[in-house]
Amino acid sequence: MSDQSISDLASAPARPRRIPVGRLAVYAIALAIGLCLAFAPFLFPDVRAQEVAARICVFIVLVASYDLLIGYTGIVSFAHTMFFGLGAYGTSMALKSWGPGWDAIIIGGGAGVVAAFVLAVLIGMLSLRVKAIFFAMVTLAAASVMMVLANQLSDFTGGEDGFTYQVPRLFSPAFKLLTDADGKTLRFFDVAINGKIAAYYFVFVGSFLLFLFMMRIVASPMGTVLQAIRENELRAEAIGYRVVGYRTAIFCISAVIAALAGVLRAVWLKYVGPEVVLSFAIMIDILLMVVIGGMGTLIGAVIGVVLMSLAQFYLKDLMEVAAEATAGVPLLPELLNPDRWLLWLGVLFILLVYFFPAGIAGTLMKKGNH
């Protein structure tokens, strides 16, 4: 090659790095979901839709924090709802005892987060040295004990029925967040700008900041080490990384984030009970959402939570409409009976796993790289 050719190559502008189409599609879907959630009170003003939107925000944090464990580090834990419940119970018990003040949220929620951190340290230090199946069993036992305690200590937790409480006046629907010259509540797109809007954006902004924090973790050198541990624990240990230390650290971080998600859920719901924050059914939902979205992607949590939540809340209604529309067709209305919605949810899950074996986000990203 001549000196002139080498000079031409050196002076040629660098080609811009192209983002794979699959990855771009995943980012576009997540961005669209994020915008819908950001404007949910105005796009979907009915009470049920706002409850679904707030639940989606909280569960995105909860599922993404679990993905840090199972997707990025290869840790299988069944105690995630325990940490979620500690944050929720800490906040709600303080609000019930001290009244609807910010001090109750900060101190009660903080106590729940600290309790989650301490338990995570104890479980991590004692159990993360053993094989994965034994660690999973330890976390399952811990979660079961917490569920029993919540049911038995009814003087503090309300037992199986749980309890309701008041939240700060800022989050009350009667609170006028913005008013006009006459003192009336301002309306935007025919939606009153009141305390309910403030409560939703408290949950949305809190969830968004926690998700950004987790994105920062996986983009940091720590995220690379976690993936190395997942792929080959022995090689990571041989290179010089303290595997148990990293596994314990991410287990504690994940527990704290789950507890903070519990605080957000308690403030929004104004009710707490074992079935709402501690049940094993929630743990199963978290697992399904991670698998549907794509393990080890973090952003897949956004897609998995939205799909699963919409199916849980609206599939039954959709089937009812479909059954009425096909009333004259033999057998079909019976198959589309709303009481069979769990059957169709199972079929939908099987199809998603078949066509997206690495989850929706994981499969799209892999296809886009080829």
Image (spheres, rainbow, N blue to C red):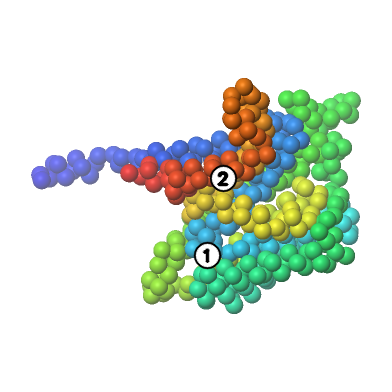
Residue 123 falls left or right of residue 219: right
**Quarter of the image holding residue 237?**
bottom left
Residue at (81% x, 59% y) in the render: 160
Q: Which residue is mark 2?
A: 346
Q: Are marks 1 and 2 in contact (CB under 8 Å)?
A: no
Amino acid under label 2?
Answer: Gly
* Disc 2 packing (10 Å; few <14; some 14–19; many ≥20): few
First in sequence: mark 1 vs mark 2:
1
* Res 70 seen here: yes
Furthest residue in direction front, as rendered: 330
Residue 105's place in the image compared with 75, above or below, is above
Residue 121 falls left or right of residue 237: right
Q: Which mark is residue 85?
A: none
* Disc 1 packing (10 Å; few <14; some 14–19; many ≥20): many
Q: Position of residue 291 (x, y in %)?
A: 52, 51
Mark 1 vs mark 2, foreground winner is: 2
Residue 142's place in the image compared with 169, above or below, is below
Q: Position of residue 135 (x, y in %)?
A: 56, 71
Residue at (63% x, 61% y) in the render: 80
Amino acid under label 1?
Answer: Ile
Q: Which residue is mark 1?
A: 75
Viewer-closest of 123 and 172: 123
Whole-number angstrom distance, CA of label 1 to CA of label 2: 25 Å
**Quarter of the image holding residue 83?**
bottom right
Circle 1 sits in a helix, a strand or a loop, which is it? loop
Residue at (74% x, 36% y) in the render: 48
Furthest residue in direction left, as rendered: 2
